Amino acid sequence: MQWYIWMIIGFVLCVFEIFTPGFFILLPGAAAIITGVVAIFVPSLAVQLGVFVVLSVLLIVFLRPVVMKMMSKNEKATNTDGMIGKVVLVTEDIDNRQEKGYIKYYSDHFPARSVSGASFSKGEVVKIVRLDGIKVYVEAASDESAVEGKSK
């Protein structure tokens, strides 16, 4: 195969990576471009295909995990992700049957429901288990001294 065909294939794959998530198609594209350089010096199609396959596999197996790990380091947890596991104060009785209740997290008040269906009274301390939109799901907290955002 002519070297410029490998280059075209590599370029098309690299451009196609823009439209796909996961950093996967770029690596065979890079392998095709490198195979294009090899094709300038080695006219054998079998050798070119071997170089392409071996390079593609090696890049996917060894380079992709490293790049994915580096990319995931830049992901930041949102403020709401940070709420999970925090111990907070009930500001309005939590009652799932009446669909009412609020908790206070720092200066913000959030509608709250009990995970287990248990009721909590105003002033009790609960732990945030999960969020659904702005609604907070809570359970009984074991450590009352760890209340988040409690005024001193």
Image: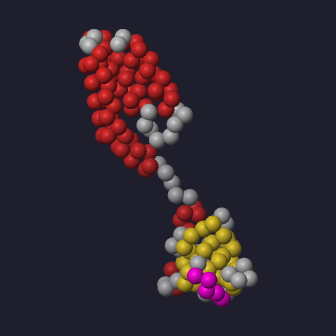
Nearer to us in this view, 148 or 24:
24
Nearer to us in this view, 128 or 79:
128
Quadrant of the rendered structure where residue 117 is?
Answer: bottom right
Q: Is residue 33 left or right of residue 125?
A: left
The answer to whether any part of residue 40 appears in the image is: yes
Nearer to us in this view, 121 or 1:
1
Would you say the magenta stretch is mainly helix, strand or loop?
loop
Q: Residue at x 49, y 85 (%)?
A: 142
Nearer to us in this view, 130 or 8:
8
Q: Which residue is outermost to the front?
A: 46
Q: Is residue 43 left or right of residue 103?
A: left
Residue 109 position within the rendered picture, expressed as x and y whole percent measured from the top left: 68, 73
Number of numbered discs visible in the structure rendering: 0
Q: Residue at x 39, y 18 (%)?
A: 6
Question: In which quadrant is the N terminus drawn?
Answer: top left
Residue 122 position within the rendered picture, expressed as x and y whole percent measured from the top left: 67, 87
Q: Residue at x 41, y 44 (%)?
A: 68
Q: Is residue 37 left or right of residue 90?
A: left
Which residues, given as a range, are shown in magenta?
Answer: 116-121
Residue 140 position within the rendered picture, expressed as x and y whole percent measured from the top left: 55, 84
The answer to whether any part of residue 126 appears in the image is: no
Q: Residue at x 49, y 84 (%)?
A: 143
Residue 152 position within the rendered picture, expressed as x and y whole percent measured from the top left: 59, 81
Q: Is residue 39 magenta?
A: no
Q: Is residue 133 above or below residue 41?
A: below
Quadrant of the rendered structure where residue 101 is?
Answer: bottom right
